[in-house]
Image: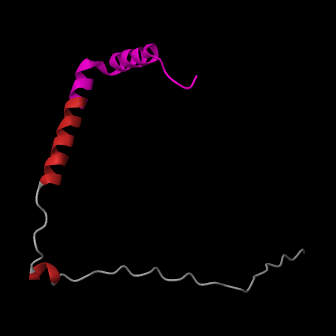
Amino acid sequence: MGSFSIWHWMIVLLVVLLLFGSGKVSNLMGDFAKGIKSFKKNMAEDDDEPMTPADLERPTTTIAAPPAAPTTTTSTRETVSQG
C-alpha cells in the first residue's frame, strides 16, 4: 500500500495523456527545459561587479508603522424605556 507499481504509473501516464494530449505535454516539457537552461545560464554569469558610487548614494526607504488603534475602556449602555 505504501509504494506504487509500474502499472499504477502507466495508468497515471495514460490518464494524463488522455486529458492533456501528447502535444501539450511535450510543449510543457520543452518550456520546462528552456527554463532550466535559462536558470543555469543566469547562475553562470558573473555578477560580482563592484558597486559604483551611484549605487551607494541611493536613498534607503523605510516603511512607516501603521498608526496604533485607539483603545477605549469606557462602555456605553443603551437604556430602553418602556412606555
Q: Is residue 53 above or below residue 39?
A: below
Q: Is residue 11 left or right of residue 2?
A: left
Q: Is residue 82 left or right of residue 30?
A: right
Magenta stretch containing residue 16, yes or no?
yes
Q: Is residue 46 above or below residue 39?
A: below
Where is residue 24, by image quadrant? top left
Residue shown at 36% from the left, 19% from the top: 19
Magenta stretch containing residue 3, yes or no?
yes
- For the N terminus, the image quarter is top right
Q: Is residue 59 above or below residue 37?
A: below
Residue 55 point in image, percent of width and height? 14, 78
Most foreground residue, 46 or 62: 46
Residue shown at 43% from the left, 15% from the top: 6
Q: Is residue 30 left or right of residue 65?
A: left
Residue 36 point in image, percent of width and height? 21, 41
Where is residue 48, by image quadrant? bottom left
Where is residue 46, by image quadrant? bottom left
Most foreground residue, 38 or 40: 40
Q: Is residue 53 left or right of residue 29?
A: left
- For the C terminus, the image quarter is bottom right
Residue 8 point in image, percent of width and height? 46, 17
Residue 82 point in image, percent of width and height? 89, 74
Residue shown at 75% from the left, 83% from the top: 75
State whether the magenta stretch is mostly helix, strand or loop.
Answer: helix
Most foreground residue, 28 or 75: 28
| Colour scheme | secondary structure
Q: How many marks?
A: 0
Magenta highlight range:
1-28
Most foreground residue, 74 or 35: 35
